[in-house]
Image (cartoon, grey):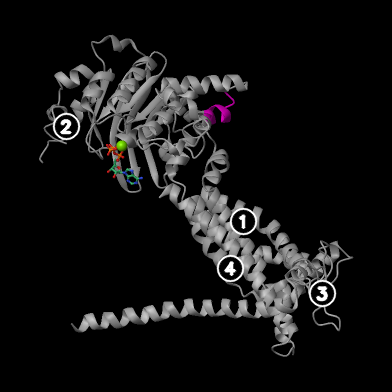
Amino acid sequence: MHTRRLEWIIERALFVCAALSVLTTAGIILVLAVETFEFLREVPVAEFLTGTEWTPLFATPRFGVLPLVAGTLLVSAIAMVVALPMGLLSAIYLSEYAPDGVRRIVKPVLEVLAGVPTVVYGYFALMFVTPLLQRVFPQMSGFNALSPGIVMGIMILPLVSSLSEDAMRAVPRGLREGAYALGATRMQTALQIVVPAAFSGITAAFILAVSRAVGETMIVAIAAGQQPRLTANPFVPLETMTAYIVQVSLGDTPQGTLEYRTIFAVGMLLFLMTFGLNLVSTWLRERFREVYS
Amino acid sequence: MSVATPSVRSLSGLVARPGTASTAVSAPVKIDVDRMNFYYGAKRALDGISIQIRANLVTAFIGPSGCGKSTFLRSLNRMNDIIPGTRVEGTVLIDGQDIYTPGVDVVELRRRVGMVFQKSNPFPKSIFENVAYGLRINNMARSKAELNDRVEESLRQAAIFDEVKDRLHESALALSGGQQQRLCIARALAIRPEILLMDEPASALDPIATQRIEELIYDLKKTYTIVIVTHNMQQAARVSDHTAFFWLGRLVEYDRTDRIFTAPAEKLTEDYVTGRCG
Ligand SMILES: Nc1ncnc2c1ncn2[C@@H]1O[C@H](COP(=O)(O)OP(=O)(O)OP(=O)(O)O)[C@@H](O)[C@H]1O
Ligand SMILES: [Mg+2]
């Protein structure tokens, strides 16, 4: 009787914890939605989504979010160019080539890399990578998209590699054996059988990585600059959506003003982007699981 | 149960004369295994296997579950290499060449020694691509037409063409278990190996498909050396020329199939084939 009562209490307590986290999330989304709604009552959606100038703190403010979106996409794209090929190759190596001993060492090391605080990466980009790149590209300014992009790529590399490797290791051994039995080499088996069989899992890893890159804040806030600019030039300062939110949050913009509400509108857009990416990623992984469970 | 382990004398005596007094004796030795031991880590799964498998005959491996039939079969094309911690002792010669000496091209070996697995394992590709894969990686088809022809021929041989001819470009994973198994047979046949290792190829098939596979095996032995693992005694008796009986990692008896089933030398064999143990 006593234990049953205790179990009841524990169960309730766990439920409250779970409910709290759901409620918190719902609350955040609600606040985002309300403030965004307020913002959109003053700025038409069309202007917000298609305008090419972002100057909310100027005397004649403009609320076109495209420069921020472009900044986010440019830095993320650079990060993915770094992280995708290297992450996939390292996953192929770890899953198909590395002896057990090597894997047992490399995997935890990669995971440690994922645990480095992003602020460290940010200063690494600003103080180390940027000066290094400036020797190659003298025209590059101190704040730019290239350096934080590369460093962000290094940051999400472990994620890509680890998740892709999981997907590849989930491919049944029998499939590899089937290829070997036909006279396939290790390379052919890895590239033509294992990678395609793990395709949805690998894609899910990629998308999750993109979502991480889009939402990453510290590195770009430190090393990319704070100048909203609609450009594809990786050498000049620009501003991403996240960096803008940091900038306004840290400033002294009074609550309740339109300027203040911009961070919610930008935050909402950011949320929708990463949420959409995560949904696609989850869906792909579920599909992958169906095939091999 | 208390079964006396057969003495080494009787074992080696039997192994030395497979197919004695049959027409088969003239067939050349294709696979010659001498005192082979196999280990999964520290665990010995095969113990002193010596056997000579003859060309263009069908050799059946029988024995209770877990006695090492698959392990032995898989060591004939070095498929166990990819399982970490496995180890082979003794010699395995194919056409007189030791396949475990350093420097052997394992890829080339597996091309010559094809395999159908106990668990069907089609690639998550289309039916056509499953069969074409081996042809493609080995550059065995010089033209699109030749590729198509050989895919179709292999599917016909494996008695599955009629069932899939209208959906060659659909996923192989949508096939039933028995169809998948026949597809895997077709895939193995496509590259025309010299030796075909089949691990319970008919265990997931209905009687009609089983019969077609057995007919196929009969046809194939003109050009191939076939080794088949089966739990079905009637099947072993029907399709094979020689039968090897395994028990707890040892080769107990190896002889002409008719003798194994009518006048085995070992009590253990007799008990097993008559269903009294195992
Ligand atoms: N990958 C492995 N790792 C460790 N032990 C294994 C492995 N595969 C097989 N074994 C062991 O080796 C022994 C022989 O197994 P094997 O699969 O060769 O038997 P089998 O005769 O083919 O059985 P079945 O008729 O059930 O297929 C068994 O005791 C099994 O547990
Ligand atoms: Mg088996």
**Residue at (40%, 33%) from the top-left corner?**
B180
Q: Are marks 1 and 4 in contact (CB under 8 Å)?
A: no
Circle 4 residue:
A114
Q: Are marks 2 and 1 in contact (CB under 8 Å)?
A: no
Q: Chain of mark 2?
A: B
From mark 2 to mark 4, how far is it between C-alphas?
A: 60 Å
Asked whether mark 2 and ligand 1 are closer than 8 Å, the reply comes as: no
Q: Chain of mark 1?
A: A
Mark 4: give few (<14), some (14-19) or many (20+) Cα within 10 Å.
Answer: some
From which residue to which does the magenta span run? Answer: B132-140
Pick the residue in front: A47 or B241: A47
Label drawn at residue A87 = 1
Return the disc, 1 or 4, that comes first in the chain's sequence. 1
Q: Chain of mark 4?
A: A
Label drawn at residue B6 = 2
**Residue at (27%, 79%) from the top-left corner?**
A7
Q: Residue B234, relative to residue B117: is it above or below?
A: above
Pick the residue in front: A215 or B54: A215
Q: Residue B155, relative to residue B75: is it above or below?
A: above
**Within the displayed image, which quadrant is ligand 1 positioned in?**
top left
Q: Is residue A254 left or right of residue B208?
A: right
The three-letter amino acid code for the residue at tag 4 is Ala
Element carrying mark 4: helix
